[in-house]
Image: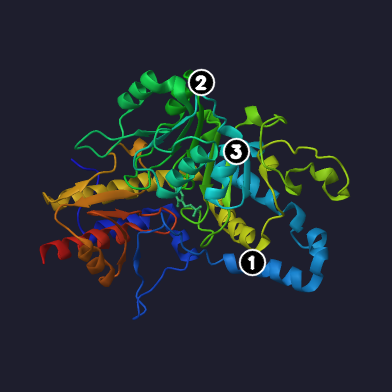
Amino acid sequence: MSKYKLGLDYAKQQDHNDDLSIYRNQFYIPKDTHGNELIYMTGNSLGLQPKTTKAYIDQELEDWANLGVEGHTQAKNPWLKYNEYLTENMANIVGAKPIEVVVMNTLTVNLHLMMVSFYQPTKTRYKILIEADAFPSDKYAVESQLRHHGFDDKDGLILWKARAGEELANYDDLEAIFKAHGHEIALVMIGGVNYYTGQFFDLKRITKLGHQYGCIVGFDCAHGAGNVELNLHDSGADFAVWCTYKYLNSGPGSLAGCFVHERHAHKKDLNRFTGWWSHNKETRFKMRDDFDQLPGAEGWQLSNPPILSMAAIKASLDMFNKVGIKKLVEKSKKLTGYFEFLIHELNDKHIKIITPQNPEERGCQLSIQVKNADKSLHHKLTQAGVISDWREPDVIRCAPVPLYNSFQDVYHLVDTLKTILHE
Ligand SMILES: *Cc1c(COP(=O)(O)O)cnc(C)c1O
């Protein structure tokens, strides 16, 4: 017996019983041309706008208008310290200590800055291990690091591939890779939650394995931050990066997060690129001092940050932390479990969920393979008011986000899919 039931009434009842359902109303939900709310399933790509964001940005615009440069110290939220207002909330979301977290730059930039410090190849240990279907930007970034150090980007890359006929990466295969090549691998760089399959990797297990073989281990958690409990500190990972415009709802192209494990916080001799924002805060503005490395993740900052973008992040994190990542994940498991149940109930042999069945090995996203389908399926879904994501050749990705998606959203999504498939 499933713990879920069919029918719209059940979905309505679940929304009624849901403590977090009040948060939906704190977001702008995109509408169709007739003013009906769309079924928004792409919070894994661009999170929706909290209604509070505007006021947070307006505050900074107003302080800039009234104070000019004095806003650095006199604004309601003095700009000089703005990144610090985000640190603790962000650390809670990713399961880290404040000294391990900073919000700065954008995601791929942070990945490169981390590799400047943590990818230190030698003649015999220079390879980078990455999952085979990594997000393209990550693959391009690691390939360019290999070339930057004078290595061949094909020879230097080791891919953790799913087996033939399977979609998910397998830990036995990972162990075999380490057994065969561990001594050649300088860096392990894996997407914490794979963007395509939705597979949430065991960060601790991968880190332990990598460290056993003397490798540095980092994760791109773009699809994990705000979606799953990452527990970055406990994972032991050397570094992690993520963006804030997906599950963290901070607006298109907004700033990114970066984690550097506490064990590296005070290593002043670690190779890195620096700027005035990596310098000791107390003496940063004397401008004449010799460089004095700021400890912790903040020590990787380069520039004074864009306050308007940070204000949007602050708005989102303030809301996120009112709820707490634990409660969010709790709802998320129910919502995605319900989604999985409805898909199975379609009983359609053309449909296969490629995301792991184990709730501990996934976040809210389900990637649904529809055999013999093409992009017209995605167009029909869009026409019917469902915003989903299509990945060639035949996969729809849908991410019911616990902060603003409802059980009724999920019901209507699957009902629409069913209608289209039966046409
Ligand atoms: C979204 C995403 C990116 C995008 O990188 P930007 O630098 O923010 O453009 C990179 N990697 C992964 C794994 C992603 O999910």
The residue that mark 2 highlights is: 214
**Image point 43% across, 53% down: which residue?**
19
User: Mark 3, mark 2: which one is toward the viewer?
Assistant: 3
The residue that mark 1 highlights is: 57
**Image point 42% across, 59% down: which residue?**
404
Question: Few, some or many C-alpha atoms within 10 Å of disc 3 (few <14, some 14-19, many ≥20)?
Answer: some
The residue that mark 3 highlights is: 116
The tag earlier along the polypeptide, 2 or 1, is: 1
User: Mark 1, mark 3: which one is toward the viewer?
Assistant: 3
Hey, what amino acid is under mark 2? Gly
Q: Are marks 1 and 3 in contact (CB under 8 Å)?
A: no
Left or right for 295, reference 340:
right
Distance from Cα at disc 3 to Cα at disc 2: 18 Å
Across and down, in percent, residue 384 comes to 25, 70
- Residue 277 versus residue 183 in the image, above or below: below
Across and down, in percent, residue 185 comes to 46, 26
Q: Nearer the viewer, residue 80 or 123?
A: 123
Q: Secondary structure at mark 3?
A: helix
The tag earlier along the polypeptide, 3 or 2, is: 3
Q: Nearer the viewer, residue 320 or 274?
A: 274
Q: Are marks 2 and 1 in contact (CB under 8 Å)?
A: no
Q: Secondary structure at mark 2?
A: loop
Q: Nearer the viewer, residue 294 or 31?
A: 294
Quarter of the figure with the N terminus? top left
Beta carbon of the mark 1 residue lies under 8 A of ligand 1: no
- Residue 404 versus residue 271 in the image, above or below: below
Question: Few, some or many C-alpha atoms within 10 Å of disc 1 (few <14, some 14-19, many ≥20)?
Answer: some
Hey, what amino acid is under mark 1? Ile
Distance from Cα at disc 2 to Cα at disc 1: 45 Å
**Image point 62% across, 41% down: which residue?**
101
Q: Nearer the viewer, residue 259 or 165?
A: 165
